[in-house]
Amino acid sequence: MARYIKKRSKKVGLPPGSLVHIGERKAEQVKISIREFGEDQYYETTLNTFDQCVALKNKTTVTWINVDGVHHVETLEKLGECYGLHPLVLEDILATDQHPKMEDYDEYVYVVLKMFSYDDRSTAETVIEQFSMIIGSNYIISFQEKESDIFVPIIERIRNAKGRIRKMGADYLGYTLLDTIIDRYFLILEDLGERLETLEEELVTNPGPATLQAIHRLKREMIYLRRSVWPLREVIGALQRSDPKIITSQTHPYLRDVYDHTIQVIETLETYRDILSGMLDIYLSSISNRLNAVMKVLTVIATIFMPLTFIVGLYGMNFKYMPELEWHYGYPMVLVVMSIVVICMLTYFKRKDWL
């Protein structure tokens, strides 16, 4: 549960806007990547601090600042001073347990959502990371908890001037980042679907304690994924209602496409959720069926041995004047009678389809 719930005890009693990092430190050092581009120009560099950030402001080109590592408070303070970011925005960036949301601050728009990936497909452990983004009139500032390769295709498109990305503004770049993250949700959903199918087969054929643990683990991941996706509808809708100086009308059709993808993800999640909700009932039914099968076998065996026990008990009383006590063929005859009883009972059970 530590992957889903972050401890906020160190913020108790602090005033609003206090900059305290909440969550796991996933990067050793903060890496700042700067990319400036226009239709006919491109420039990129890497910084360790924001001392040179003043030179990045008031550019005629689009500036994309990507920060890998959000644990360094001083770095974010310098960035906030340079771009005039509200202290509550910086506080939300540092707190990695934020709910997906969009906030409009007139001069810029702040967006936060979750990124999901699989660190190791063999263990199917979901890696959760918070992604924060500030969209200005001609700049984008994005924040990741650690360096990843999710935006490598976008970077290559910017470098090679492919598509519309260098012809459009910062809002289109923001849409592209959102679209890439939401498309990654489909990969997670495909893996979840495969795991659901495997669990369904295991539930019917050979359920066990490990199956029940897998159901609860998958259910927990599904709840968190659903919680992270549902608010995205409001986020995308709010972006379309933002100031036209930040989100232009040219970008609205692309945002509607992202909205459609979000609805598709939500509907798929709801379907998986319904399937998963019934899996526990299937598990209990499978365990009950196995127990019934075992009890059926034991009942048949006990029923067969009941008349045999009666016959053995009858001839085990050792009365002096029992008629068959002195008979030479008494013992073989009792065995024959017992065998006939067993055969008759098995034949009867077979005709009743009890075996």
Image (spheres, rainbow, N blue to C red):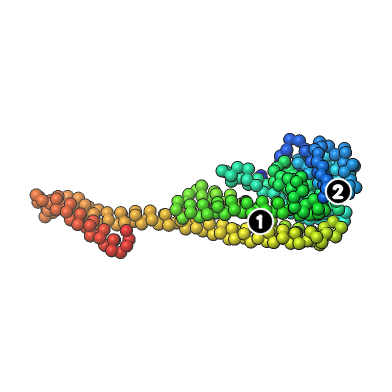
**Pick the front one: 31 or 317:** 31
Rendered residue at 61%/45% (across/down): 125
Question: How far across and how far down the image is residue 268, in percent?
Answer: 62, 59
Tell me whether circle 2 and circle 1 mark residues in contact (CB < 8 Å).
no
- Separation (CA) of disc 2 from disc 1: 37 Å
Quadrant where the image shows the C terminus: bottom left
Residue 336: horizontal and vertical position, in percent?
A: 16, 54
Of tags 2 and 1, the one toward the viewer is 2
Decide if residue 187 is on the left or right side of residue 296.
right
Q: Is residue 47 above or below residue 262?
A: above
* Residue 288 visible in image: yes
Q: Nearer the viewer, residue 137 or 12?
A: 137
* Residue hosting label 1: 226
Q: What amino acid is labelled 1 in the image?
A: Arg
Mark 1 neighbour class, 10 Å CA radius: few under 14, some 14 to 19, many 20 or more: some
Q: Secondary structure at mark 2?
A: loop
Residue annotated with mark 2: 61
Q: Residue at x 54, y 48 (%)?
A: 213
Residue at (52% x, 54% y) in the render:
197
Locate residue 9: give its quadrant: top right
Residue type at mark 2 is: Thr
Q: Is residue 16 visible?
A: no
Towards the viewer: 66 or 339: 66
- Residue lying farthest to the front in this orientation: 40
- SS type, badge 1: helix
Q: Is residue 306 left or right of residue 229?
A: left
The percent position of residue 266, horizontal first and vertical second, equals 66, 59
Q: Quadrant of residue 307?
A: bottom left
Q: Residue at x 83, y 45 (%)?
A: 41
Q: Closer to the N terminus: mark 2 or mark 1?
A: 2
On screen, 32 above or below 136? above
